[in-house]
Amino acid sequence: MDGIRFWRLFIRSLPLQAPVIGLLATLCALLLHTLAPATFAALEWAPYDTWLRHRLPIQASPSLTIIRRDPAGDDRFGAGPLDRMVLATLITAAHDAGASAIGLDHRLDYASPAQLDGATSDALLLEAMETAGPVVFVQGLDSTLSSEAAIHSQVIVATEPDHVTRHIPLLASVNARTLPAFGSVLYDLSRQKQAPRAEALATASAEPVLVNLVGNGSLDSLPTLPLSAVWNAVQQRDHEALEAWFKDKVAVILTGGAAAQDTWLLPTGQPVSGTVMHLHLLNSLLTHQQLHKPGAFAPFTITLLIASLVGWCLLRYGGSTGLLAAGATISIYLVLLIAALPLMLLVLPTALPLVACLFVVMGSTAWTHLTASQRLVLLERDMLRIRQDEAAVRESLTRHESRAEALQEDLDTARAAVARSAGEQEDLSRTTESLRADLATVQLQEQEARRQLEQLERQLHGLREAGIQAGSLGDAELDHLRSESRQFGIVTQDSALLRLFHDVKKGSKSPLTVLLLGEPGTGKELFARAVHRLSPRAGRTFIAVNMAAISPELFESELFGHTKGSFTGATADRRGYFELANHGTIFLDEIGDLRLDHQSKLLRVLQEKSFYRVGATTATTVDVRVVAATNRDLQRGVSEGWFREDLYFRLTGLIFRLPPLRERPGDIASLAEAALADIARQLGKPLPKLSNDALRALETHTWPGNVRELRHTLERAVALTDQPIVTVPDLYLESRGAALEKERISLSPDTAGDKAVLDCLRRQDFDMQATAKTLGWDRSTVTQRLKGLCFQALVEADGDRSKAASSVAGDPGQVRTVELKLTDYYQHLLSVIEPCSSPDDALIECKRRFKNLPDRHFQSVETLVRRWFAHHHRSMPHTSV
């Protein structure tokens, strides 16, 4: 049982699941890193390498002076190793000029050869090093050249020439001795001279450091001096030049020895010597541009944190919302990673967090599927336990109730015999009160048990609904929905409409307002009745109101009722539709045809759940579920101003769009079969059958009136025929293909008149695609024809766009749509002619751009062009040249 309780606690505890998934994903990422280190290294250093190539260059430190060999110096001292007497002279000159630290790229692990003055040169160099104080030189020191003024340093960690190196170790082990890095020691000496109590960098950490390069990382990017120039200044005793070069600066003398032959390959692709890399390190320290990288355990900690946070988002929200939250978390980290380099000079880990997040996404998905069944088992087990407890509580309640009744009888008897003993009466009263308290406690326990049971049932129902919603509806469920929908008069085989019915079932249980959209005859009232019957209000009244059929003068009286004597003819109090539908459902059909003043009154009822009868002084409060329907585009009505925006948002709690019959031709056969059975029963005739040709004719018809038109067609056929088979002539119906072909022949682009095209556009509410489909044209042809009609109307209206849009639209409800299109067309025309210098040039350009525009409409274009140029040149100010 302990294991079951732990499993239940873990599976329901999000703070436990997310870190566990994050830890497992982090460990998997580390394992993958071990198996594929090269791939991880490429991903890990991608931001650093990209930033290094494309960033703004950093400046070289003015506190650094590098003496390098040059051809003139080689001519004077030879191309081989330098005489140590020359090095001694350079060290002495730099020290005398005030150098804060001196570095020497020269090994002292051998004595000078005889041809370079041998011991004399060594003695001069040692004397110069003792005079100049600590001098940093490359590893190794011969016992004969020992000096207390020398500091050992390690320049290079051996690497292959083609290996990309990004780190420099601050400490290196050489011949069982730990030596600091060349550049870090020079920086320590310089800083200690400026601040004697400063802590040494070389001993601060043994971790390697990243290099922040100057330029492309070559020696030419750093401040250098040719050896010959410095030597000439020393020989000529040019103290001003020497002080300008060395005063309070770090001086480094490069001799081009053996150490410089080992090379690095930078992330920029530039091979440089190891000493140069240390000089770039020294420069980044002097300019405070040192790059930082988290310690050894920081990548693991950061990865674990990011992976746990992503796992929390996926488990907390689930579905697309969880994926969006997880993606936002990863994006924020990527932005932080990219911004950390230029802003904080910090290189954050890349590969481990991203790979771990990928594992988290896969793991969370697998975890959700694996634990779904276990969650269901736990919930069912809890339900069984609570039901057992409920049965036990009910039994206890029954016993206590029986005992309380018996005690009540005893109490009555005791009251009748009150003379016996006042003490006995008090005991009986205490017993009765105790039993009543027990009874109240048991009742509270029962209520709590019922509440827990309802809560668990809601959880179980929610889990099952979530499982259904997450996946697609299977064939078995579609079959169940198909049979269930027939109980509400909804006959369909279409999977999309069945899924919509599935959503209606779920939404009916909520108190939200429902808005049904669709063409006339698509079955909006059937779905409204289904919403009512599937809701908790199914046992209450359902009132259907056709808003378009209500007289404007009687609107308030019909919907809200009136009192006796409130107006002429009000001989008695009358309840309105809303009051009749109290605690039930009211269906407001054709809601889009309401006038604006009626919309505001309806909005008040939806907001406050109360209204005033006509002539009443007190408000009437109702509890009504509102289901509205319309075949108009309410969103466009809001934008065009004929429908209130606040009422639109009140109505759009749940929106269901019913597809027209032409989009589900597979339903025509079943609809026809059901309609024929109903019609035959009403007319008292035998059930007729459809011939194959008649069924094909029904399936190819466009059905602008949808199911209602289909039923009327079948009613007419059954009424006018006595045959058991309904044939094509009985339907009095042209096939869809013949009707379309006839319309296409009569409305070809070459022969169609403007009026016919405009009428078709108006019928299709200026939907260019629907119009093109109806006419059998391509969409661009319809667009050019409407563009020409708009230009013509604009000319006739003398430039008044509103007047031109009204003449083209015909219907006031379409004026806003046409005005938007007209404005767009006219702005396009202006963009074509504005760059032109004369009307003739503009007309030539218009001929080229509007080549598909009919010639009769191009005359309107010419008029608009010449008007624009005339007005434009009149309004231009006259200036003298």
Image: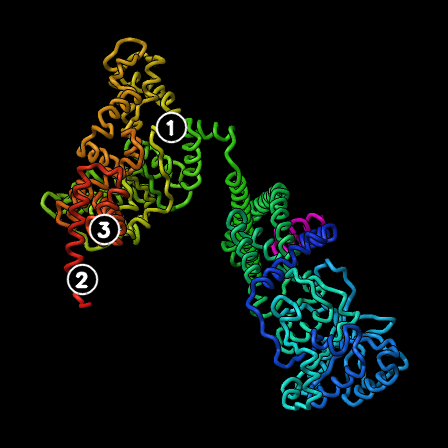
Mark with earlier residue (2, 1): 1
Distance from the alpha carbon under mark 2 to that under mark 3: 53 Å
Q: In the image, which disc is placed on residue 601?
A: 3
| Image marks 3 and 1: residues in contact by CB distance under 8 Å | no
Q: Residues within 10 Å of mark 1 (few under 14, many from 20)?
A: some
Q: Quadrant of the C terminus?
A: bottom left
Residue position for label 2: 876
The spot of residue 594 in percent (x, y) is: 22, 44
| Residue numbers of the magenta segment | 1-23
The spot of residue 567 in percent (x, y) is: 11, 47
Distance from the alpha carbon under mark 3 to that under mark 1: 38 Å
Vertical comparison of 281 with 322: above or below: below
Residue at the extreme front of the image, as rendered: 75
Mostly what secondary structure, the magenta segment?
Answer: helix
Mark with earlier residue (3, 1): 3
The spot of residue 79 in percent (x, y) is: 76, 73
Secondary structure beneath label 3: helix
The spot of residue 348 in percent (x, y) is: 63, 63
Which amino acid type is marked by label 1?
A: Arg
Is 21 contained in the magenta span?
yes
Distance from the alpha carbon under mark 2 to that under mark 1: 61 Å
Residue at 29 percent of width and 26 percent of height: 703
